[in-house]
Image (cartoon, rainbow, N blue to C red):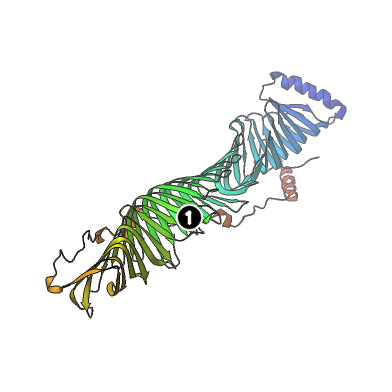
Amino acid sequence: MSNFAQPKHVLLYLILIWTGVGAHGQQSSTLEITQADELLGAGNFQRLIGNVRMSHQSSLIYCDSAHFYQDINQAKLFGRVRIEDKVDPITTKSTYAEYDGNTKIAKLRNKVVFTNQETTLYTDYLDYNRELNTATYFNRGKVVDSTNVLTSERGLYEINLEKITFQKNVELVNPDYTLKTNNLIYLTIPKTAETTGLTNIISTEGYTLDAQKGSWYNTQAKQFRFFDGIVENEETRVKAEELYYEETTGYYEGKEDVRVLNKERNVEVFGDVGQYWEDRKYSLVHGKALVRRYFEKDTLFMIADTLISQDSEADTAKYLQAFHSIKLVKAGLGGIADSLFYNYSDSSIHLFQDPVLWNEKSQIVADSMVFYIANETLDHVLMKNKAFAILTDTLLNYNQMKGRKMTAYFADGKISRLDIDGNGESLYFALEGDTLTQGINRILSATIKLDFINGSVTRAKFEIRPDGKFLPVQNLTEEVSQLDGFSWRIEEKPTMKTISEWRAVQEIDLNAKNLFNEPILEIILPTEEEIQKEVMKRSMKPEKRPVVKTLKTDLKNEQ
């Protein structure tokens, strides 16, 4: 009889194998041949050709042809390989595979498709461990489900946990955004993704979301949590050590080193904890809060305990509020107050509860005040109730003005004119050639208008029966040289040291590494022709003992 069994004897031969080998039971670790059009060989090695079907415990194995090594319980499968699990809804396809019945490991190669319900994995190199119920791929793979497409160089699918770990050059593509990272864990049932290390996202609407220390996403609910993260669009940039973002509602919540930049207003807000509602353009920041208002030439700094910012579409509803322990610093300007209101529409800053404003050599106090910035410099200040202005002249004398209401106008950063309305009082030193003090002019008037150059009065205008007197220098004492309520509080003037001690800001590295800027490296896999040549070359070598070879061998595609 020939070594090649005739087709009509194949079924009988399979029955004999089934009864002799398969009698150990369905849960035996032995690979079993259940069908083939033609079977060649005998003993420990059989060659199966045409419509091959094998079984192993709960798995059904199909292919075009196979080499079966009975003594080591291993098979090499060629052409249209398909492994189906009769218990779990898992099907695996490829053009070549090696199956070990002892270890329950299937090594599938070339055009591998691994399907588990709605999740499908595509790769060319997959090891499927049925004992652990894990699938491992390398040299690039792609996972597709109803929501996302994920690709990476390497991956581990833990089927019982519905968990896939992606490593190296990971990319997640969603209808709304694309994500890139190097380490990502994806849970297929809730469709959540967790990353470690650098993570970059670009949304279809133009948002960029970046995290230096990893992130967490609910890809269906579109909820994101970033660690050392930044979310940015054309209008806003939000950063925090821990940043939560809900895309459907446009809600942000940050913890530790929170900062919100309004690009249109050139205003950036910092704090320990912050919230931002994108639809209302409303933010709340507290805990060592800091505001930086960027101008072309310099920056206005403000610190407070709590900040509220509103930047809605209506100009009248665009403002910034600050509460408790307010301090302001800007190029020669310093100020303190208990609370503040900044109106974006007219660049007016309202200070309340014992506000004090210093500019160059002047000091202004009142129950409340409003100062206006025009062309990036202080333009004028309105003071209400108990207004008191002090200006130092070239000899460091204190020129003083007080009244119910007061308006100070500035030129080149210094007071140029002062208008007092109601219960006006003025005390200013008369100088001779800016080098000698002649005496003091003290005047009472309902309204007073004074012009200044370098802190010295150059012109005075009084209305409604002024009452004034001149005191010569020899009659001057500390008591007559000061109006009631005089208090020079220069030691309270905040400086940049005050700002930096309150909150030291680490600037954002705008050139930080971004995976979207990395060149795309294409892995060139061997062609089908190269694989076949290698298989043919290796298949001609005599084998002393049938063994399971490495994953790069025996890829012969027999028909």
Up the image or down, 189 lies above or below 303; here it is above
Q: Nearer the viewer, residue 198 or 373?
A: 373
Left or right: where does residue 556 sit relative to residue 512? right
Dividing the picture into quadrants, the one containing residue 412 is: bottom left
Image x and y of residue 555, in percent: 72, 42
Left or right: where does residue 108 sit relative to residue 440? right
Up the image or down, 324 lies above or below 38; here it is below
Q: To which residue does mark 1 refer?
A: 261
Q: Amino acid at mark 1?
A: Leu
Image x and y of residue 50, in percent: 82, 34
**Direction left: furthest residue:** 474
Q: Quadrant of the N terminus?
A: top right
Image x and y of residue 258, in percent: 44, 49
Dividing the picture into quadrants, the one containing residue 426 is: bottom left
Residue shown at the point (42%, 51%) measured from the top left: 321
**Direction bottom: furthest residue:** 433
Q: Quadrant of the C terminus?
A: top right
**Residue 125 visible in the snapshot:** yes
**Residue 397 visible in the snapshot:** no
**Direction right: furthest residue:** 8
Q: Report the number of discs.
A: 1
Residue shown at the point (64%, 35%) measured from the top left: 128
Image x and y of residue 107, in percent: 66, 37
Q: Nearer the viewer, residue 116 or 460?
A: 460
Up the image or down, 234 lies above or below 284; here it is below
Up the image or down, 443 lies above or below 218; here it is below
Residue shown at the point (60%, 57%) measured from the top left: 519
Q: The residue tagged with tag 1: helix, strand or loop?
A: strand
Q: Nearer the viewer, residue 350 or 450?
A: 450
Q: Nearer the viewer, residue 551 or 47?
A: 551
